[in-house]
Amino acid sequence: EVRTADAATLRFPAGFRWGTATAAYQIEGAASEDGRTPSIWDTFSRTPGRVRNGDTGDIAADHYHRMREDVALMRELGVTDYRFSVAWPRVQPTGRGPALQKGLDFYRRLCDELREAGIRPVATLYHWDLPQELEDAGGWPRRETAERFAVYAGLTAEALGDRVATWTTLNEPWCAAFLGYGNGVHAPGRTSDADALRAAHHLNLAHGLAVDALRTALPAGTEVSLTLNLHVVRALTESAEDRDAARRIDAVANRIFLDPVFRGRLPEDLVRDTARVTDWSFVRDGDLAAVAAPIDSLGLNYYSPTVVAAGSSESPSPWAGAERHVRFLPAPGPRTAMDWPVDADGLYELLARLRDELPGVPLVITENGAAYEDYADPSGRVRDPERVAYLRGHLAAVRRAIEDGADVRGYFLWSLLDNFEWAYGYSKRFGIVHVDFASQRRTPKDSARWYADVIARGGLPAAP
Ligand code: GBH
């Protein structure tokens, strides 16, 4: 049987955006250059016992000095879009006051380089690197941080507005609130359920106020978005108890963001569930309307699903008290090097849910990918067959969701480069480009070649 190139490709819609994603602290390094001040991740990673092997982002993938090389790599891949984050402590070192020109210049040069390569710049304003001074003043549990964020968003948009194609306010506020202030596994490493809930509200507020600031600063029609790591929560059984456990986690992980942002209200069950933790009096009149400022798309980061049942689990936890009622179970099947289950159906379920619950909201997969060990053969070729299989399965799920009516506009692979994987330091590699952290040498892995082929054909090769 002879198949044409087209018949052999499971095609994605015309205009689908194919991207890669990174975040400032995970790749830039140059932690104290050009006036950058410490963020909460500098402080956290320099605190013994917080990050595996004592790793820090001081040098990371040295992207601050190798930006042109990294853009050239993306040009080779043929990506249409690149999602990066702006380091707040680089462009407004104390989190207050005027912008620092040198910091802005780096992102200006990055955008210019991208545009010359024909790649659309997609900027995230907050990927977890809060200026330490703002944390010292109270951090995200404090309302002022939300107001400061909106000012920072406005001045960054004024400086880069003509260059950035899509603006994202926050990356994964769930992680910033509940891993940062709930179980303390992320910076700033605090453990208080009440503070985590306050942080979640102030992150929502920061998002809404920033949307307003962006609309004021940017040309009309510029895409403004938010990225959430929504949890795909499955009840172990259909029993009322297990389904109630799933409802609790859905409330504190998903609806705590979705309801304020898209409906201007807090989930009633969440307020009830958390009554012994907080009375929510930090939510002021008008806040929820501000949070609900209309946005143009929703970004989703998906890695794996969560299975829950009635029971209890350990504290401190990122679940604001729900851990007293919920037990977490390992999902079946193969796992990545993070020990996260490989489950592409979860991505389909997530997209189908949002298709039904948020009609009219365009969706973008702003992160998806996996950590695996690399295998280098004697020729220097870096093989990562498990990553190729993971990506193939998840892209097939995205395509299936599109066929079934989900309005998915793009896919950003996490990540372009091996990088600083937060509490795991450099021990986990998510890149499709291998980084030798001693020499900073970049080597595209097999998955990079595979992804380049997908982009070139506009879809998945029909036969693996
Ligand atoms: C993303 O976060 C980040 O945006 C990115 O910077 C990071 O490098 C990348 O993913 C890989 O980790 O306790 O049930 O939630 C990932 C968010 C949150 C996903 C914790 C896995 C663990 C299971 N992660 N979650 S649960």
Image (spheres, helix red, strand yellow):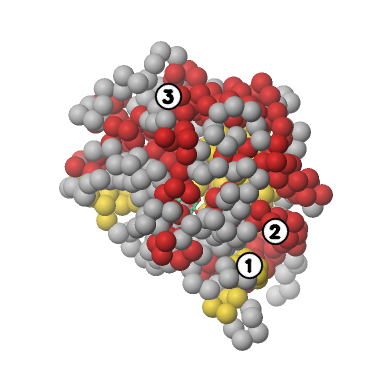
Question: How far apart are the alpha carbons under marks 3 and 1?
Answer: 40 Å
Pinpoint residue 194: horizontal percent, then vertical percent: 29, 32
Residue that lies at the very extreme toward the top in this rendered image = 285
- Residue 392 visible within the image: no
Reading the image, the residue beneath label 1 is 440
Reading the image, the residue beneath label 2 is 66
Relative depth, front residue between 33 and 159 = 33
Image disc number at residue 91:
none
Pinpoint residue 365: horizontal percent, then vertical percent: 56, 47
The image quarter containing residue 287 is top left
Q: In which quarter of the image is the N terminus?
A: bottom right
Question: How far apart are the alpha carbons under marks 2 and 3?
Answer: 37 Å
In this rendering, the answer to whether 332 lies above or below 122 is: below
Q: Is mark 2 on a helix, strand or loop?
A: helix
Residue that lies at the very extreme toward the right in this rendered image = 116
Q: How many marks?
A: 3
Tell me which residue sits at (61%, 53%) in the image. Answer: 30
Q: What element carries label 1?
A: loop
Tell me which residue sits at (40%, 27%) in the image. Answer: 142
**Would the CB of label 3 be found within 8 Å of ligand 1?**
no
Q: Marks 2 and 1: in contact by CB < 8 Å?
A: yes
| Marked residue nearer the N-terminal end (1 or 2) | 2
Q: What residue type is labelled 2?
A: Arg
Reading the image, the residue beneath label 3 is 143
Tell me which residue sits at (59%, 55%) in the image. Answer: 29
Q: Which amino acid does label 3 sit on?
A: Arg
| Marked residue nearer the N-terminal end (3 or 1) | 3
Q: In which quarter of the image is the C terminus?
A: bottom right
Pinpoint residue 387: horizontal percent, then vertical percent: 53, 67
Tell me which residue sits at (46%, 61%) in the image. Answer: 55
Within-10-Å neighbours for mark 2: few <14, some 14–19, many 20+ = few
Q: What residue type is labelled 1?
A: Gln
